[in-house]
Amino acid sequence: MVKLTNIKKVYNPGKSNEFEALKGVSCEIKDGELVAVIGKSGAGKSTMLHILACIDSYQGGEYSIDGELVKKLSEREYARIRNEKIGMVMQDFALVEDFTALENVMIPLSFSKKKVDNKKEKAMAALKAVGVEDLAKKPCNKLSGGQKQRVAIARAIVNEPSMILADEPTGALDSKTGAEIMELFKQLHEQGRTVIIVTHDPKIAEQCEKVIEISDGEIIKTA
Ligand SMILES: Nc1ncnc2c1ncn2[C@@H]1O[C@H](COP(=O)(O)OP(=O)(O)OP(=O)(O)O)[C@@H](O)[C@H]1O
Ligand SMILES: [Mg+2]
């Protein structure tokens, strides 16, 4: 289970462009839940997801993963959790464009503290799981948006994380490709993973078990 308690996030603290993006956010997400985070542009959705993914800091409140306070983790433990428990699909894919699909998916395996055997096979299995193993050797700058999204998902699942976070994974896709990508997330959820999806699309949100709505840095509704 992950739990945010009264999380406050301030960008550029103490500076003239200081901005409070999260104003005391509290929520609980259980293991294996399929959750949507919705809200208008600028509401704080990506900010909340980045904190959940352990890739951004916060100024107040507590974040705990499986009962452990993230703040109290050593740098090493923090990196281990980020790498082994969490898979993140960024809003703009964040693929290395001139790397091949396979090379992109292998990146988290090289960061892993655990010795990972058969990195190539693991990365190929992840590409296969999202249906793009035939694109393994293609540079990402030659892929379509939907294909890039699949490669980004393969990279997020290659370490077999228990929690997958995706920021607008269907936002840049046509509705058919978007529906296919949503099917992939539902499969990951059915395999027992926690899946948290930021979305503007009510059709995506209605397929989730829980919908968290953020407005101006606050959760205004959980349904
Ligand atoms: N690095 C940053 N520095 C300063 N302000 C930021 C930074 N990142 C985000 N913000 C501000 O924090 C607020 C929340 O941003 P966030 O990216 O979380 O919104 P969002 O809900 O994901 O929006 P969108 O739907 O457009 O992606 C916005 O007002 C944004 O301008
Ligand atoms: Mg965003």
Image (tube, rainbow, N blue to C red):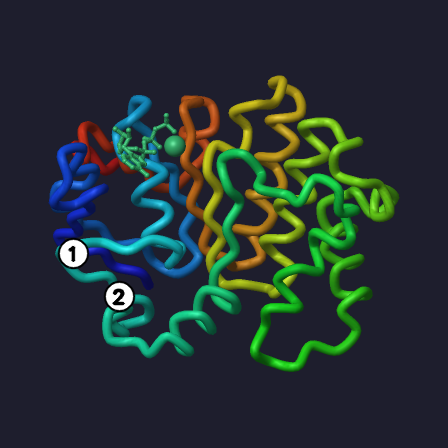
Q: Secondary structure at mark 1?
A: strand
Q: Left or right of 115: which side holds 141?
A: right
Q: Residues within 10 Å of mark 2 (few under 14, many from 20)?
A: some
Residue 20 image point, x, y percent: 16, 38
Quadrant holding the C terminus: top left
Which residue appears at 38% of the width and 37% of the height?
36
Residue 73 percent coordinates (x, y): 30, 76
Give amino acid for label 1.
Thr
Check disc 1: other Cα within 10 Å, few if <14, some if 14-19, many if 20+.
some
Q: Quadrant of residue 121?
A: bottom right
**Residue 62, placed above or below residue 101:** below
Q: Of the numbered discs in the image, which one, if any, rests on residue 217?
A: none
Residue at horizontal 30 percent and vertical 22 percent from the top: 40
Q: Which residue extends farthest bottom?
A: 115
Instruction: Locate the N terminus and report the quarter of the image it occupies.
Output: bottom left
Three-letter residue code for mark 2: Ser
| Residue that numbered label 2 is attached to | 64
**In 3D space, how far apart are the residues under numbered discs 2 and 1 (Cα atoms)?**
8 Å
Tag 1 residue: 5
- SS for dot 2: strand
Residue pictured at 75% horizontal, 47% vertical: 99
Specify which label sits upstream in the sequence, 2 or 1.
Answer: 1
Q: Residue 201, position in %: x, y?
A: 44, 22
| Front position in the image: 139 or 169 | 139
Say whether marks 2 and 1 touch (CB < 8 Å): yes
Question: What residue appears at the point 71 percent right and 60 percent down from the top-left corner?
Answer: 106
- Note whether 72 is above or below 138 in the view shown: below
Relative to residue 8, is residue 133 drawn left or right? right
Query: Where does ligand 1 appear, by image quarter?
Result: top left
